[in-house]
Amino acid sequence: MGLLWWGRGLGAAFLRTADNLRVRVAFAAAEAAPFVKVGGLADVAGSLPQAIARLGWDVTLYLPLHGTIDQATWGITGTAPERSVPYGASHVRVAYPSVERDGVRVVFVANRRIGRDRVYGAPDDAKRYAFFCRSVAEAIAQDVPDVVHAHDWHAALLVPMIARRAPTVFTIHNLAYQGQTSAAVLAPLGLASAKLPVEKRGECNPMARAIARADIVSTVSPRYASEILTPEFGEGLDGLLRQRVADVRGIVNGIDTALFDPARDPHIAERYTADDQRGKAACKAALQRQGGLRVDPESPLLGVIGRLVEQKGIDLLTAVAPDLLEGGAQLVVLGTGDPAYEERWAKLRERYPSRLFLTLGFDAVLAQRIYAGCDLFLMPSRFEPCGLGQLISLRYGTIPVVRAVGGLADTVHDLDLHPRDGNGFSFTQYDRAAFSGALARALRALRRGGDAWSALRTRAMREDHSWGPSATAYADVYRLAQERNVRAADGERTPLSY
Ligand code: ADP
């Protein structure tokens, strides 16, 4: 390739060529598809490393060995290397089994303090993920990569632990979850307990610490990158982020286009492409049948997949559902979340058993059938860092109806505002009337059908939401982090370093 990279030296930059040495990046994340998935973080950590590897980087992904990861299925067998990880006054034995997947080395961090049946939600999550970070730091300190890329609060404390030794990039997938805990978590990690201005006395905010310390802070869409600098979306960290604005970047997520592909999807009733969409009708009929709905090509079929929480606009969805169902639409909802909303949706199912197909659970196969079978996909989010549901639904020719916020605003363009290149429907004001208005416009366009609707579908399916351009943007960010880190070692560190 002959590209030049800035390598890290003892304060002095040296040039490295991609010809003689592959540049190495280490990812750390709490979840990654296909091994373990709760939400969008898993999609990203399960496909971005592969895309970076395809650009010629040497990529390792560190992942907790959660109890739900099926070790036999993934070939996580045999004896794994072990290390004695210093943790406070003690040392803890940690094993690091690894597998190779699509050009990426996936290293599982195996210890009973870390591996549980649930990825999130244990009372000691903060300590558990702090120890995960400590274990990753220990592994990479033995063989320091050229860049460390940590994701969300679970991997955040890795940044201050490793920042003196390697350039760091920290990616915010959702600023609403910061992992605040007691400052007592810091000492066993060997981290200073001096508090950041945004921390309360005695508190540690892992996400804030990573934002303050990383060479580059990125988030998952350009719009969210500018939103989080404001008090409305900043979740209390907008001041800190504004101080780092020169180092904040927004890169829109891609999707795994091999996994989410209506031309090859093994789980859908009939495969189809942008050029020949006939199979989509069979997918719709199969989904209606599976859900006990009337099998009717003319009934609009609307899909919702995601966490049933306020962030995702579950209050708006709950408010409009009776009108939609009374108006002749059919709804397919798949998700888990706030128990109060789960209960309200279970009641709606009792009231509309032949019009609402509700699944309160996590089901990746059903999700693919919903993306393929529906006419419209709904995401009226209050805030949305990137959102993957709308990208996957576009790929399946299922037209998104979204609130124009965060990554939804970057990726969905309202058809009425952009008649030639629109790919969905959107609204701005977070209220029921605005959402209903966008839904009414979408349903009118769907009912009119004809060439206009098939042109819209074809355009949606032809859009490129693969990782290509975004992976290149991350590679640029890695080089920038390397440059910044060299300068920092030369004494030009940002005033925020501690
Ligand atoms: P989040 O904020 O939850 O990360 P995203 O839209 O970024 O939301 O990503 C959610 C991802 O998880 C998508 O791939 C979506 O299809 C998937 N997903 C969410 N809930 C479920 C569920 N109950 N069953 C199957 N897949 C789900």
Image: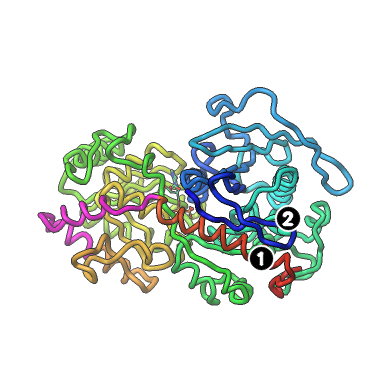
Residue at (32, 44) in percent of width and height = 370
| Quarter occupied by the C terminus | bottom right
Residue at the outermost right position = 89
| Horizontal relation, residue 362 to residue 218: left or right | left
In the rendering, at what x and y percent does residue 400 appear? 30, 57
| Horizontal relation, residue 407 to residue 45: left or right | left
Q: Is residue 337 magenta?
A: no
Decide whether the magenta segment is chiefly helix, strand or loop: helix
Residue at (27, 43) in percent of width and height = 373
Neighbour class for label 2 at 10 Å: few (<14), some, many (≥20)?
A: some
Q: Which residues are magenta?
A: 440-466
Residue bearing the label numbered 2: 165
Residue 29 appears in the figure: no
Res 444 quadrant in image:
bottom left
Callout 1 amino acid: Ala
Front residue (pair 97, 388): 97
Residue at (53, 76) in percent of width and height = 230
Residue bearing the label numbered 1: 208
Res 378 quadrant in image:
bottom left
Asked if the residue at label 2 sits under 8 Å from ligand 1, the reply is no
In the rendering, at what x and y percent does residue 388 appear? 41, 53
Q: Earlier in the sequence, mark 2 or mark 1?
A: 2
Residue 16 appears in the figure: yes
Q: Is residue 447 magenta?
A: yes
In the rendering, at what x and y percent does residue 301 appear? 25, 49
In the rendering, at what x and y percent does residue 375 appear? 24, 50
